[in-house]
Image (cartoon, coloured by chain):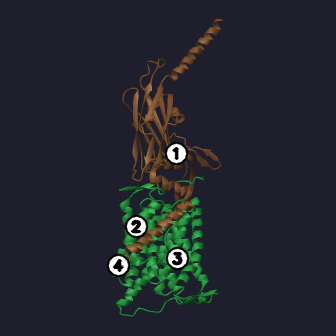
Amino acid sequence: MRPLRTASTTLLLLLSGAAGAHAERLIASVSNHRVTVTPNYSGEELVLFGSVEKDAQTPASRSAYDLVVTVRGPRADMVTRRKERKFGIWINTDSRQFLKVPGYLALFANRPFDAMAAPEVQRRQQLGLNNVLLTQRVGPDYADVVPNDAFRSAFIRLQSQHGLYREDTSAVTFLTPTLFRTGIPLPAAVPIGTYEIEIKLLADGALVTKSETAFEIVKVGFEQFVATSARQNGLVYGLVTTAMALLTGWMASIVFRRD
Amino acid sequence: MQIYLPIADIPVNIFLLLAMGAAVGFVSGMFGIGGGFLMTPLLIFVGITPAVAVASVSSHIAASSFSGALSYWRRRAIDPSLALVLMIGGTLGTALGVSTFTLLRSLGQLDLMIALSYVALLTSVGGVMFWEGLRAIMRARQGALPTVRRPGSHVWIHGLPLKMRFKRSKIYVSVIPVIGIGLLIGFLGAVMGIGGGFILVPLLIYILRVPTSTVIGTSMVLTLATMMIATMLHAVSNHLVDAVLALILMVGGVTGAQFGARAGQMIRGEQLRLLLGLLILAVGIRFAVELVIRPADLFTIRETEQSQ
């Protein structure tokens, strides 16, 4: 009987050890769950704040946490094209298609990813723009490529130039050892749709727990009306635009009539 | 004041757009052209994608050509039957142009084609116009009388069948070249976002020998028709017409055109042609330079159309 009891005790210990890894709870919320794009919208910054809740099972030795916040905008297929000199002029030759990649992607952390975890963990947990999965169509296959692939890095660079992709390893600040906040800057040309926020809590170079929240960006009022009618009722939209053109032209000929 | 353009999906300063509309309107009023060949490149320059620029400018040109056509109509300076036959070709050409536009867009070569067509068309037309204007001024300086003979004696065109009499223009010509010209203008207009007045007027004068009394009014009617159809087709097939952008441009454009027309009356005909030629040539060369020099960034990204 003795060996069996030892085994079950070991199992219990293991279980409690495993549960201990999930002892913390993450509670987070954004300042605004619904961002509205109005005709004079020129970008905005949301604030994400939250706290890490410890409980009895949290190892007493654990004091420092690392936090990585990933914000992903609505997904779309994008194509990256490369120009080459042909017949003396620069034309698009090679292209790569990125499948269902986020239109907005931001990674915020409290300190550099290298300081947080080993490269292997960084890769598995997709910490940093270099480790985020961006699926490409490579011939008949779908795969992500090495971070220094020319098309991949050009894609990230161009998206970053527009403020749509960003990485900031000092954006998350711990107000107290368990209370944190970070800003989520949204540029003017931000895509419309649902944004997922994933918050990953790390300690001692490993993932402890994660939490998710979301917000949405919507066009409202006249904006929304014009954009949706152009997409859904192309014919009516075209007729109205043409009528508007004729009306403007006619009014001009009345107002500025000289004969 | 920033305004968010719903289709172009970018915020733009409303006063910048109004000023651009007014400036292009001034030029178009001065030379009696639509000004699309200036407006489309300007929009591309402020960051609007070539596709949205081409599609939206077509409705802007429709507005300015309608106001022009109305005043020519009151002066009975439009040949209705000639305009009608031109429109038959124009409609076909526009439909062909919009489908070519859609195809090129899916192939990723639309921007290149727009740039190449601008280079080819603008440098050649601008060059010829500039040269003609220069020669006319030289002749005037030497004291020689300007030739009154209408140049170009396209005999074969007058031998074509299906002849028709266009009363107000006092010409008797086959409908084949008329439809052909309409087709060409419609096609170019839809692909390049231009009204095509600056090509159409010389074609009507030199090939069909339409008299100057009806040529501008009639060409405006064709421009109006092709641009209305282009707006419709771009709206239906590509969803690229930005009505807010178009409206701002129209308001600026029709206002600027009035002042341009007054300024144009103060300049002599051949000097006007020289200036216009120079302007067209400059835009063409700018596109050429852009194609030849190494771009600042070799990569571009674009969202691919989602099939809904």
- Tell me the amino acid under the disc marked 2: Val
- Tell me the amino acid under the disc marked 3: Leu
- Tell me the amino acid under the disc marked 1: Pro
Q: Quadrant of the N terminus of chain A?
A: top right
Q: Residue B48 in the image: x percent, y percent? A: 45, 59
Q: Colour of chain A?
A: brown
Mark sitting earlier along the chain (3/2): 3
Q: Label 2 is found on which chain of the structure?
A: B
Mark sitting earlier along the chain (2/4): 2
Residues beneath discs 2 and 1 located on the same chain: no
The alpha-carbon separation of the residues under discs 1 and 4 comes to 52 Å
Residue hosting label 1: A74
Q: Residues within 10 Å of mark 2 (few under 14, many from 20)?
A: many
The alpha-carbon separation of the residues under discs 2 and 4 comes to 18 Å
Figure check: A55 above or below A163? above
Q: Which mark is residue B222?
A: 3
Q: Label 1 is found on which chain of the structure?
A: A
Marks 2 and 1: which is nearer the front? Answer: 2
The alpha-carbon separation of the residues under discs 3 and 2 comes to 22 Å
Residue hosting label 4: B262
Q: Label 4 is found on which chain of the structure?
A: B
Asked whether disc 3 touches disc 2, contact meaning CB atoms under 8 Å apart, the reply is no
Q: Residue B218 in the image: x percent, y percent? A: 50, 80
Marks 2 and 4: which is nearer the front? Answer: 2
- Element type at marker 2? helix
Q: Which mark is residue B251?
A: 2
Residues beneath discs 1 and 4 located on the same chain: no
Q: Residue at x 52, y 43 (%)?
A: A147
Q: Label 3 is found on which chain of the structure?
A: B
Mark sitting earlier along the chain (4/3): 3
